[in-house]
């Protein structure tokens, strides 16, 4: 039975706790920690667990931690936990710099502990099905991927999320990696990537809207389009794959108010193929559910297997993003 500590009781914490509730036979949550006691108490009472303020004082009570903190704290807290012999499930992105990512990867290896980064989408059943469909050959060769995330976050981006130093960049650093991770998983290594960005109305230092183009080593090309300044966010996540004989589209959108409802929010996920004729390949209620991600983490901890989204996989993504930012600077700015 694993004993879990949750470090950070902000927006994403209830999603981790809701997923952990499904593993009562494998894990128990020993405590939730936050420097803000109001936040820690709120999460603790909602999930009937103990609230603490300083995770370092209770690390001896757990063998695994979920680290759900602002990005600039990822390296420092992860290394403390790994050095104390804890397995770590860390929210994305791995860190704000490649140097920090390297420190964390080396620390996990030195201490022989699991370090997994929470890129949840590739663990979702619908995305796994999407990958099988578009790479399986039944619609011919895949040659283009096009992903869009449309989110309305104007009122939510304050504090650490509004500053480049603490977020690591803008939307392309913080959230487009959800799409990049899936694209790299589907199409393999990237040969080159470029990004442009702009401000659509969020009060943050980095770009709130970004588009990127990618060329993969296998010849596939990709596009990401992402805004945090959507006026409505009607569709939260769309990924399209263009194959020789059909365009396959996955959409995932919340039915209710995600910010109000949290893990209780209802979702619709749909996969359609448009080719010689139109087909609906999947209709499900799958949404922002971390169950499969958490299960993979436990499986890796139990068997010693390397997580699919380990430190190195997560490092590749910030390397791609930081190189694209640097390239944009050379062209005169994002
Ligand atoms: N997978 C997803 O779809 C998804 C969605 C949102 C956020 N995230 C990620 O989750 C992480 C947290 O994001 P969030 O939106 O929950 O942020 P948040 O600002 O809502 O919460 C962060 C919490 O960390 C606490 N904190 C700060 N320093 C601390 C410390 N030293 N010890 C303990 N607690 C401390 C803050 O008080 C706050 O409650 C980020 O990495 C973010 O990118 C992932």
Image (tube, rainbow, N blue to C red):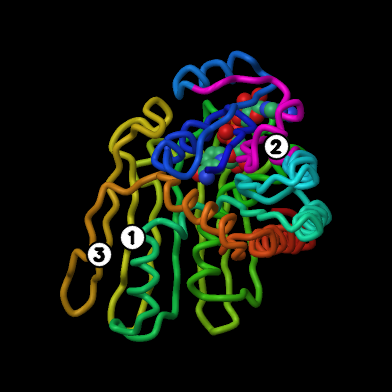
The Cα–Cα distance between marks 1 and 3, rounded to whole angstroms, is: 7 Å
Q: Measuring 64% from the left and 26% from the top, which residue is drawn there?
A: 33
Q: Measuring 83% from the left and 55% from the top, which residue is drawn there?
A: 99
- Circle 3 residue: 272
Q: Within the image, what quadrant is residue 324 found in?
A: bottom right
Q: Measuring 56% from the left and 42% from the top, which residue is drawn there?
A: 2
The Cα–Cα distance between marks 2 and 1, rounded to whole angstroms, is: 31 Å
Give residue 13's position: percent from left, percent from top: 53, 32
Q: Residue 60 got which mark?
A: none
Of marks 2 and 3, which one's residue comes earlier in the chain? 2
The Cα–Cα distance between marks 2 and 3, rounded to whole angstroms, is: 37 Å
Query: SS at mark 3?
Result: strand
The stretch of residues the image draws in magenta is: 49-73
- Circle 2 residue: 205
Q: Is residue 165 found left or right of 299 in the rendered image? A: right
Q: Is residue 255 found left or right of 7 in the rendered image? A: left
User: Can residue 123 be seen?
Assistant: yes
- Circle 1 residue: 250
Query: SS at mark 1?
Result: strand
- Local crowd size for mark 3, using a 10 Å CA cut-off: few (<14), some (14–19), many (≥20): some
Query: Whereabouts is ligand 1, in terms of quadrant?
Result: top right
Q: Within the image, what quadrant is residue 79 found in?
A: top right
Of marks 1 and 3, which one's residue comes earlier in the chain? 1
Query: Does the segment drawn in magenta span residue 64?
Result: yes
Give residue 95's position: percent from left, percent from top: 72, 49
């Amino acid at each position: 039975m694993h004993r879990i500590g949750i470090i950070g009781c902000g927006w994403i914490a209830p999603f981790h706790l809701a997923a952990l509730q499904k593993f009562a036979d494998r894990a128990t949550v020993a405590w939730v920690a936050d420097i803000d006691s109001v936040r820690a108490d709120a999460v603790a009472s909602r999930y009937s667990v103990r609230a603490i303020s300083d995770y370092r004082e209770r690390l001896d009570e757990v063998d695994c931690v979920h680290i759900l903190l602002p990005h600039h704290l990822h390296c420092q807290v992860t290394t403390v936990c790994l050095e104390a012999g804890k397995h770590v499930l860390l929210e994305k992105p791995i860190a704000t710099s490649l140097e920090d990512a390297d420190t964390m990867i080396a620390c996990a290896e030195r201490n022989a502990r699991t370090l997994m980064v929470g890129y949840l989408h590739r663990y979702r059943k619908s995305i796994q099905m999407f990958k099988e469909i578009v790479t399986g050959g039944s619609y011919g060769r895949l040659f283009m991927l096009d992903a869009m995330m449309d989110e309305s976050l104007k009122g939510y981006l304050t504090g650490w999320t509004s500053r480049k130093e603490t977020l690591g960049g803008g939307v392309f650093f913080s959230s487009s990696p959800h799409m990049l991770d899936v694209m790299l998983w589907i199409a393999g290594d990237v040969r080159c990537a470029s990004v442009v960005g702009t401000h659509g109305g969020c009060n943050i230092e980095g770009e709130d809207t970004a588009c990127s183009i990618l060329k993969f080593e296998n010849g596939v090309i990709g596009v990401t389009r992402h805004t945090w300044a959507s006026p409505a966010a009607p569709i939260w996540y769309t990924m399209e794959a263009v194959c020789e004989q059909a365009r396959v589209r996955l959409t995932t959108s919340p039915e209710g108010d995600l910010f109000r409802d949290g893990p209780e929010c209802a979702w619709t996920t749909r996969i359609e193929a448009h080719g010689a004729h139109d087909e609906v390949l999947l209709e499900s209620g799958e949404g922002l559910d971390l169950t499969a991600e958490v299960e993979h983490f436990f499986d890796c901890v139990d068997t010693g297997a390397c997580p699919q989204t380990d430190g190195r996989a997560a490092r590749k993504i910030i390397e791609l993003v930081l190189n694209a930012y640097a390239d944009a600077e050379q062209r005169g700015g994002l």
